[in-house]
Amino acid sequence: GPPCLGLLPCSGFTPAACPLLEYTGANYEEKVYHFGDAPDFDKSQWLDVKFSLGLDFPNLPYLIDGDHKITQSSAILRYIARQYNLCEKVRTWPQGKLPPYQLMANVSFFLSQEVLKIEYLEQLPGQLKLFSLFLGKWTWFAGDKITYVDFLVCDVLDQNRKFDPCCLDDFANLKAFLDQFEGLSRIAAYLASDRCQPYPIFAKIACWGNK
Ligand SMILES: N[C@@H](CCC(=O)N[C@@H](CS)C(=O)NCC(=O)O)C(=O)O
């Protein structure tokens, strides 16, 4: 059958895998695992199957494509990208988690400490400036051709835009980059479709981005 992407109904933990699959035109299925409501956040839907799917490192999200059973969102992205020639980087891109991801998660899960949000917003322009300078006048983040890196960056920028709608105002090239990405015909079609669920960024257990 087609590859199956297992995920929670929150976009913040499936960075870019859905848009990337959509962009490739691949046929794929989604298996969404729902957690219960507060105070228990019952995880049984997932825990009942977690260790029976044949995953080496059981986690969400996962991608099962025949004999290939992959976890870790960045590994999933690179797996898809390799199949569709979307990793031809001409510029060096730092591997691993982008700085804003972890920060966003911290803020979201501990927002009751309002001070964290203030600290986050204080350092955000500095972080975004690094992205803006790195992109410079290039069309895409890793060169002249679109790669999986662009899907990651779009995800990060979009999350931050949801957190602070004005945060890109000083970075015209980042705004133009997002517009260009969202204007790609397959991405635009996906964003307008009911396959693109308006999932919250984070799970119910988070304090921000959970609705
Ligand atoms: N580093 C992992 C993090 C995955 C992660 O934190 N998953 C969370 C939210 S989707 C989870 O609930 N996993 C299920 C589990 O740990 O059993 C990745 O990038 O995929």
Image (cartoon, rainbow, N blue to C red):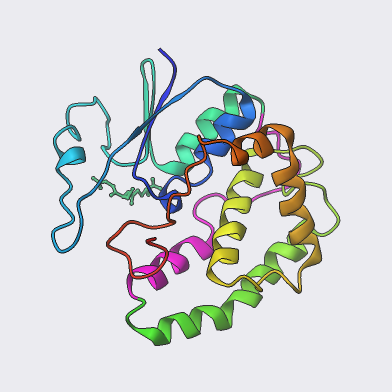
User: Is 106 within the magenta?
Assistant: yes
**Most distant residue in the top direction:** 1
Q: Compared to 98, does 165 lie above or below?
A: below
Q: In terms of depth relative to the viewer, which is nearer, 82 or 11?
A: 11
Quarter of the figure that contains the C terminus: bottom left
Q: Compared to 99, does 46 lie above or below?
A: above
Q: Compared to 138, does 127 lie above or below?
A: below
From the top left corner, tell me how far across and down residue 66 is, in percent: 38, 15
Q: Residue at x 74, y 64 (%)?
A: 132
From the top left corner, tell me how far across and down residue 126 is, in percent: 65, 76
Indicate left or right for 149 with 47 as reference.
right
Q: Residue at x 57, y 79 (%)?
A: 123
User: Is 96 within the magenta?
Assistant: yes
Q: Quadrant of residue 128?
A: bottom right
Q: Quadrant of residue 2?
A: top left
Indicate left or right for 7 with 124 as reference.
left
Quarter of the figure that contains the N terminus: top left
From the top left corner, tell me how far across and down residue 120 is, in percent: 50, 78
From the top left corner, tell me how far across and down residue 44 is, in percent: 14, 42
Q: How many marks?
A: 0
**Most distant residue in the right direction:** 137
Q: Residue at x 63, y 52 (%)?
A: 154
Range of the magenta residues?
A: 86-110
Indicate left or right for 119 with 142 as reference.
left
Q: In terms of depth relative to the viewer, which is nearer, 111 or 72?
A: 111
Q: Compared to 88, does 4 lie above or below?
A: above
Indicate left or right for 57 with 135 as reference.
left
Q: Quadrant of residue 122?
A: bottom right
Q: Residue at x 53, y 43 (%)?
A: 16
